[in-house]
Amino acid sequence: MKNIFLAILTISLLTNCNNSQKKSVDKNDRLELVPEPDKELREEYEKQQELNKSKCAFIDPDTSVIDINIRNTKSTLNILGKQTKLEGDSTHVFYSSDKKQKLGLTVHPGDYYSQVSIFNISYSDNSKQNFRQIKSKEFETEKGIKLGISKREIIEKLGACYVAKDSTKNGIILNYRIELPEDSKTKLLTSNNTPIYYATYKLKNDKLEYIEFGFEYP
């Protein structure tokens, strides 16, 4: 009888041990299926670090659109009119003359009225919003970058020191960046007392459809 009891106890312990191991494996399997929440950000950061180590420097960035210069209030008023008052902590949107393109001008909190720190350019959607129109038919940067151009044309104008990010099967995003203590040959960051300049160019089917560049808010 004692031997039977010991046999039953041994079988019970082995069964519980196997179940415990199975549960542990199942749990680990489930954990492996959970996606890393910040994977894209981590990969983009790692690519940027690799670019920095390669000593590939982005040295000639865009700083204006249709003669509105970054963080230059006078140039904004020259284009939009002396009575223009773009408030801080806001992005102010304007249509091109034919309403086919939109220009966003961002003024950071605490900056002077109409002192633009970020530009963004995109095609208009079908919604009829009451944005003010600007005389320009298209919004072009000082480097000649505008909607519709190809990846090759962007690289010809800005260089190959970018981090590429695939967004869709037929799309790609080119990210350029300057951070202190690195600076452009024009000392763009130090002269504007800002730590980071970035530029983003989103293409679909090799056609530029979105532009954004400027100084990150400190």
Image (tube, rainbow, N blue to C red):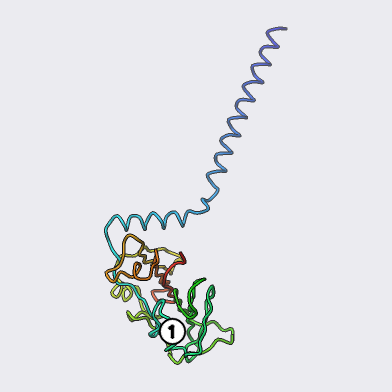
Residue 11 lies left or right of residue 216; in this view the side is right
Say few, some or many: other residues with alpha carbon within 10 Å of mark 1 (under 14 / 14 to 19 / 20 or more). many
Tag count: 1
Residue 23 sits above or below residue 142 on the image: above
Q: Toward the viewer: 1 or 182?
A: 182
Question: Looking at the figure, which quarter contains the N terminus?
Answer: top right
Name the residue rendered at 36%, 79% in the picture: 145
Residue 48, given in percent of the width and then of the height, sits at: 36, 58
Residue 134, given in percent of the width and then of the height, sits at: 47, 90
Which of the 4 quarters of the picture holds residue 26? top right
The residue identified by callout 1 is 76
Residue 27, given in percent of the width and then of the height, sits at: 58, 39
Q: Amino acid at mark 1?
A: Thr
Question: Looking at the figure, which quarter contains the C terminus?
Answer: bottom left
Residue 201 sits above or below residue 146 on the image: above
Residue 146 lies left or right of residue 13; in this view the side is left
Residue 3 lies left or right of residue 133; in this view the side is right
Residue 161 sits above or below residue 62 on the image: above
Which of the 4 quarters of the picture holds residue 6? top right
Name the residue rendered at 31%, 57% in the picture: 52
Residue at the right extreme of this rendering: 1
Q: Secondary structure at mark 1?
A: helix
Residue 17, given in percent of the width and then of the height, sits at: 61, 25
Residue 102 lies left or right of residue 5; in this view the side is left
Q: Toward the viewer: 201 or 5?
A: 201
